[in-house]
Amino acid sequence: MIMDRISLILAIIGALNWGGIGIFGFDTVAYIFGGQDSTVSRVIYTLVGLAGIWCISLLFREREHADEI
């Protein structure tokens, strides 16, 4: 499902950004888009948060078999 892939990509971006904050004290999203309070940064933070919530559903889904290619 395309929504699953988009959510995983956004969650990975968020995880990498938080890793950068934790290790280096550097917020890449804020740097690129003009600070943590800029509208674009807040939209990205919101999308990453929503993607994380969506990814919770992945934990409770039945797995599809990889044989069905």
Image (cartoon, rainbow, N blue to C red):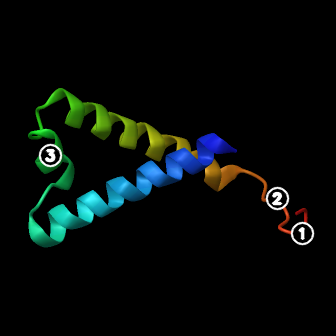
> So how many labels did they put on this image?
3
**In the rendered structure, which amino acid carries the disc numbered 1?**
Asp
Q: Quadrant of residue 54?
A: top right
Q: Which residue is mark 3?
A: 30
Q: Nearer the viewer, mark 3 or mark 2?
A: 3
- Answer above or below: position of 68 versus 41: below
Q: Decide if residue 16 is on the left or right side of residue 28.
A: right
**Residue linked to disc 1:** 67
Q: Which residue lies at the image location 61% right of the left edge and 47% below the top edge?
A: 4
Identify whether 12 is placed above or below 41: below
Closest to the observer, 69 or 63? 69
Seen in the picture, residue 30 relative to 66 is either above or below; the reply is: above
Q: Secondary structure at mark 2?
A: loop
**Which circle marks residue 49 in the picture?**
none
Locate the N terminus and report the quarter of the image it occupies.
Answer: top right
- Of residue 4 and residue 59, the one placed in the foreground of this image is 4
Quote the CA–CA distance across marks 3 and 1.
42 Å
Q: Residues within 10 Å of mark 1 (few under 14, many from 20)?
A: few
Marks 1 and 2: which is nearer the front? 1
Q: CA distance from mark 1 to mark 2?
A: 9 Å
Disc 3: CA contacts within 10 A as few (<14), some (14-19) or many (>=20): some
Q: Amino acid at mark 2?
A: Glu
Image spot of residue 13 (x, y percent): 36, 55
Q: Decide: is 3 above or below 5.
A: above
Q: Which residue was labeled with disc 2?
A: 64
Q: Tell me how far mark 3 sits from mark 2, CA to CA.
A: 38 Å
**Residue drawn 89% across and 69% down?**
67
Q: Position of residue 34 (x, y in %)?
A: 10, 39
